[in-house]
Amino acid sequence: MRGMDEFALIRLLNRRGSPGTGRPNETGVKTGIGDDAAVMKPSAGSDIVVSCDTMVETVHFLPETMQHYDIGYKAMASSLSDMAAMGARPRWALIALTVPSGPSGTWTAESLQELYDGLYACADRYGTVVVGGDTTSSKSLLTVTVTVIGEADEDRSLLRSSALPGDIVFVTGPLGNSAAGLHLLLKAGRPAVPIEDMEETVRSLVLAHRRPEPRIDAGAILASSEAGVCGALNDISDGLASEAWEIAEASGVRIVLDEERIPLSPELTRYASAAGRDPHDFALYGGEDYELVGTVRRERAAELAARFEVAGKRIWLVGEVAAAGAMNKTDKGAAANLERAPMPGVTLRSSAGVEKPLPKKGYNHFA
Amino acid sequence: MRGMDEFALIRLLNRRGSPGTGRPNETGVKTGIGDDAAVMKPSAGSDIVVSCDTMVETVHFLPETMQHYDIGYKAMASSLSDMAAMGARPRWALIALTVPSGPSGTWTAESLQELYDGLYACADRYGTVVVGGDTTSSKSLLTVTVTVIGEADEDRSLLRSSALPGDIVFVTGPLGNSAAGLHLLLKAGRPAVPIEDMEETVRSLVLAHRRPEPRIDAGAILASSEAGVCGALNDISDGLASEAWEIAEASGVRIVLDEERIPLSPELTRYASAAGRDPHDFALYGGEDYELVGTVRRERAAELAARFEVAGKRIWLVGEVAAAGAMNKTDKGAAANLERAPMPGVTLRSSAGVEKPLPKKGYNHFA
């Protein structure tokens, strides 16, 4: 990026941002982009919920995997997904962008505009107003950090630490599509083309990778359920195994996943078969599906499933929560006197009822 | 940075972050670091004020200018300064860090810990709780984005756009020290040494560059003044000329600065003289002083100055606000029929009463 000063760049990129009206309107924005900070009116009686997420060129995307628009869309989506994972309503966002400068910079004003189009399209779709940010130019890789501020009813945020033995584990959608989409894009090994130009058979997998949809809708149903119905909640950014581990550790429980109940799309099954891969690997260790995984009190699971159905959606019941098991005796780091201490963990149960421990490994982007 | 996974790194770096208590305490934090997002209770009746600021290796700091601790301290300080510039009380912060990886990475766990020590030291000093963030490792330059969330009394945030003709312009402290500190560090051209090891005569200039103090105290006095006493407000991150231009443009006025009234420290004057430079250049076009520049209604200026004195602080009255002037006839972009349209701007008035226009140029870090 050359020949444009920072202020001109900010003006260009944020020309659709909220300028602020001086009066709070339904967006809650009193002062938007253009002052030292943005000023907003939070809803009375709500908690505020805040998170940020960074995407970096070469770590989270490559020219082979994403178009400029997709990078923006996905950066916003992954931050909004953290709101879904808390059962929160996203309201406002800030975009911190570091743009490669100098002769090697391949980012033009046009490509940055496409990236911002993606950021704004996703924000708009989920009722989120961009209220600020910071733009820096450096001899670095493109880095975009999106901070999202949302709201939740007082003390009703859904945490990782609330799973109880006896709970049923659920997910909100088929898993592994995004990782399969990434797999096929990397295998193709050519610059990313528009999704519209891709073969019908792989389009949904690529779409899952490039334009994930944060499950704000599912989070809202869960948060609006009677208090205590939903236990723990997480979004699936690093694969089901890793996210289940986070819940297990935060809640001090063991999570048992039933392999055959994990929802897989027909497209994933077809693709994995053609590629000679186990589709469950994509679902368990692939990342960036941005569906939700959570737990529900056993006696309320049917009721929760019905609530989703009434809303024209569904959940999949994929396992259960048990008390933390005994520590594995072969654990090298375990002192002898800790051998029988309770230990959280995650296991995968086959249709024959055989359980095997799932490694904690998460998503390793381009490994 | 090699050989450490992201979660281990986050745990290490944030070991002093707020884990959250499940109950709101005086920090307002219900859920801190460790879930998908942080949950906080905003104060009843307050607006929330949000801003983010990015610092990148080579753009904002070099091995010659800053130690690791300083980078962290200053990254937090510059973000908190945006709260001061709104008259807001900073409350919570998120830290997004991208760490260079691979064989060329010179960042060790120890140097990152120093950087975080600086971030937390500054946050602690200003009553700000770190509630979250994101840590990424990439073959990139060190990039740190700090998002700060503060609070202000309803509709009492101090904006850039509120200057009125007739207002008096004030600043909250001597200017140019930070730029002079940078100048001498770059001239020395050797790896940064601890401030304690520097010569007494230059220590205050280097300190101003490495550990600026956001003027939260001054912002609080201004925000607590009777409504309408303080007009516009900005923090001085890019030099007085650039910040005055921002107020002039946002408010549609002309700002006249009196050269001899701009406060300069004895250290700056001495250093500039020895270096053969005009000390005003450091004050007007140097950056990162993080003092505040604002306007006050003319008839209330003495009262405001007295309020600062009662608090053991002071302001300097450095100029006045006039109606926007006529557009410069030599402006190449101006259509003939716009020639007499009002145009905002900034001028510098000498002790002899001669006014010259000040260029809008801001801080150009290492140019």
Image (cartoon, coloured by chain):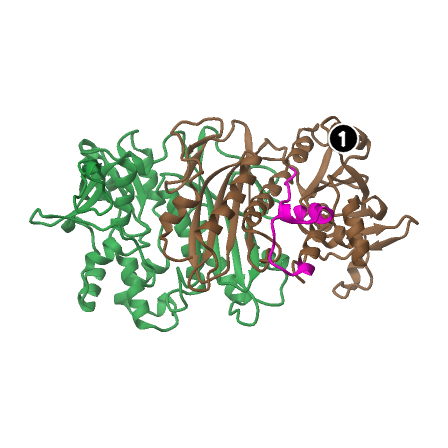
Chain colours: A green, B brown
Please tell me how crowded label 1 is: few (under 14), some (14-19), or many (20+) other residues with Cα within 10 Å. Answer: many
Q: Nearer the viewer, residue B1 or B124?
A: B1
Q: Quadrant of the C terminus of chain A?
A: bottom left
Q: Residue at x 41, y 68 (%)?
A: A63
Q: Outermost residue, left direction?
A: A352
The quadrant in which residue B127 appears is: top right
In the picture provided, is B230 more to the left or to the right than A27? right
Question: Residue placed at 20% from the left, 56% from the top?
Answer: A280
Can residue B254 be seen here? The reply is yes
Bounds of the magenta segment: B186-215
Identity of the residue furthest to the right in this view:
B352
**Residue A224 versus residue A140 in the image, above or below:** above
SS at mark 1 in the image? helix
Q: Quadrant of the N terminus of chain A?
A: bottom right
Residue type at mark 1 is: Leu
Picture coordinates of residue A187 (x, y %)? 29, 70
**Residue B262 relative to residue B212: left or right:** right
Q: Which residue is mark 1?
A: B304
User: Residue A323 lies in what quarter of the image?
Assistant: top left
The answer to whether residue A130 is seen in the rendering is: no
Magenta segment: does it hold B356? no
Q: Chain of mark 1?
A: B
- Where residue B195 appears, as percent x and y from the top left, is 63, 47
Which residue is painted at 51% across and 55% down in the image? B143
Q: Residue B292, image x and y in percent?
A: 70, 41
Instruction: Indicate the position of residue B327 as horizontal and vertical percent values.
Output: 80, 57
Front-most of B148 and B347?
B148
Find out whether residue B202 is within the magenta segment.
yes
